[in-house]
Image (cartoon, rainbow, N blue to C red):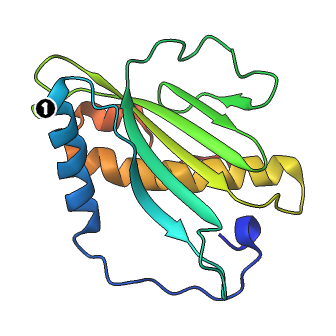
Amino acid sequence: MRLITGAEEFSSLDGSDRLESLARAVVDDYLADGSGGETHRVCGIHLPGSTLADVGIDVSLEDGDGVGDSKFAGSFKQYDLGREGLASPRKAVLYAECAGAEFEGGPVMLRAALSNRNEPEGDPERLREANLTLLHSVTLALVEQLGCEDRARLPEAAGLM
């Protein structure tokens, strides 16, 4: 987190049931129309004095078209993480295929995205890995909460840093 934001101190807001609420919202969104195109804010990281999130993590369900076809190869580095992991020094995207009792029509494609409002300073490779590692951690917690089979093929640790 320090590498991505440059901040030295961190504190959290009370949100012990936040992950459970988020998982329920994702499932409800899917059940409402069978696709779940709504984007849900997982968390926002605010630096001192900032009213806007400096780093945000969002999640949505997508149809999975184009996942793994290298269409982002010019702007993102690809990683073998979940169905596909993509990262740049400022952003990361992680696709994970979730099959479970909550999603009756078959597996759904979960898309988690991290976005940094400002261009962070530092080694681009370390920033890519830090972005994807943080996103992996959040995504793993969500797929476990959703009850995705085989943790949506996400390893216990991203293993990038």
Q: Residue at x 80, y 53 (%)?
A: 126
Badge 1 marks a residue whose secondary structure is helix
Q: In this rendering, does residue 98 appear at all?
A: yes
- Which of the 4 image quarters holds residue 61? top left
Q: Quadrant of residue 109?
A: top left
Residue at 21% across, 38% down: 29
Q: Is residue 103 left or right of residue 75?
A: left
Residue annotated with mark 1? 31
Looking at the image, residue 103 sits to the left or right of residue 132; the answer is: left
In the image, 158 versus 26, the foreground residue is 26
Residue 130 position within the rendered picture, expressed as x and y whole percent measured from the top left: 69, 55
In the picture, measured across the screen, residue 38 lies left or right of residue 8, that is left
Decide if residue 161 is in sight here.
Answer: no
Q: Is residue 138 above or below residue 80?
A: below
Q: Amino acid at mark 1?
A: Leu
- The local crowd at label 1, few if under 14, some if 14 to 19, many if 20 or more residues have their Cα within 10 Å, is some
Question: Would residue 71 appear left or right of 21 to someone viewing this image?
Answer: right
Where is residue 141 drawn, in percent x and y?
35, 54
